Image (tube, grey):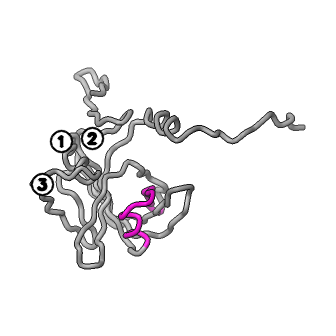
Amino acid sequence: MTAPATDVRPLGTDPRTFRDALGRFATGVTVITTDTGNGNGIHGMTANGFMSVSLDPALVLVSLGRCAMADHLHSGDRYAVTLLSEDQETLSRHFGGRTQPGLSVDFTRRGAHSFVPGGLAEIGCRIVDRHVAGDHVLFIGEVEHLDYRDGVPLLFYTGNYRSLHVGLTDDIFFY
C-alpha cells in the first residue's frame, strides 16, 4: 500500500531565483560552431548547456533557447563543440555576444566541423534528434570527431568565470 499523496504543487519559482540556484552548479564553458550553409561562413556561440548523453553510441547534447545558433541547427545537420581552456575567457566573451574589437578567429577545420583553436577538447557531431523542452531545444548529436588535450578548463560559477587549480597535494581550488 502506498502512502497518501501529499500536497504537491508546481514549483512556481520566479526565473531569477531558478537561475541563481542553478548558477551554483559549476560548468565548463564551450563554444558551439556550425557552418551556416548560406555562404556566411561559421557561426559560433558560447554555451554551458552541454552534456554527454550516451557512451554507446557516443552522444552529446546542447540546449539552446531562441537564438541564431538554434535557427542554424534547426536547418543544419552538424555542430562542433570546443571545450575552452582557462586562457580562453576572451573568446568566450566574444562568442557570448560581447564582441572583442580586433579579435579574429581562424577556425580549425576537421572534416565537416570547425573548432576554436586551443581548446581542451573538440567534439564534432551529426544531429540525430531534436527535442523541445520548455523554452529550449535539445540538439542531440552523435559524435563523429573527437580529440582532446590536457589543460586547465575555463569554468562558469555564480555568473562569473572561474579557474580550477590543483595544488601540490592534489587539493582543488577555485579562483
What is the CA distance from the residue labelled 1 to the residue labelled 2?
A: 7 Å
- Decide whether residue 67 is among the magenta residues: yes
- Decide whether residue 58 is among the magenta residues: yes
Residue at position x 37%, y 70% in the image: 72
Residue at position x 50%, y 57% in the image: 136
Of residue 156 and residue 168, the one placed in the foreground of this image is 156
> Where does label 1 land, which residue?
87
Residue at position x 29%, y 62% in the image: 33
Density class for disc 2 (Cα within 10 Å; few <14, some 14-19, many ≥20) is many
> Where does label 2 land, which residue?
154
Of residue 17 and residue 111, the one placed in the foreground of this image is 17
Classify mark 1: helix, strand or loop.
helix
Numbered range of the magenta stretch: 57-74
Query: On the picture, is 16 further left or further right than 12?
Result: left
Q: Choose top left, top right, bottom left or bottom right for residue 111.
A: bottom left
The picture places residue 51, in percent across and down from the top left corner, at 43, 51
Q: Earlier in the sequence, mark 3 or mark 1?
A: 1
> Where does label 3 land, which residue?
103
Q: Amino acid at mark 1?
A: Asp
**Residue farthest right in this picture:** 1
Q: Earlier in the sequence, mark 1 or mark 2?
A: 1
The picture places residue 54, in percent across and down from the top left corner, at 49, 56
What is the quadrant of the C terminus in the image? top left
What is the CA distance from the residue labelled 3 to the residue labelled 2?
A: 19 Å
Density class for disc 1 (Cα within 10 Å; few <14, some 14-19, many ≥20) is some
What is the quadrant of the N terminus in the image? top right
Classify mark 2: helix, strand or loop.
strand
Residue at position x 22%, y 40% in the image: 86
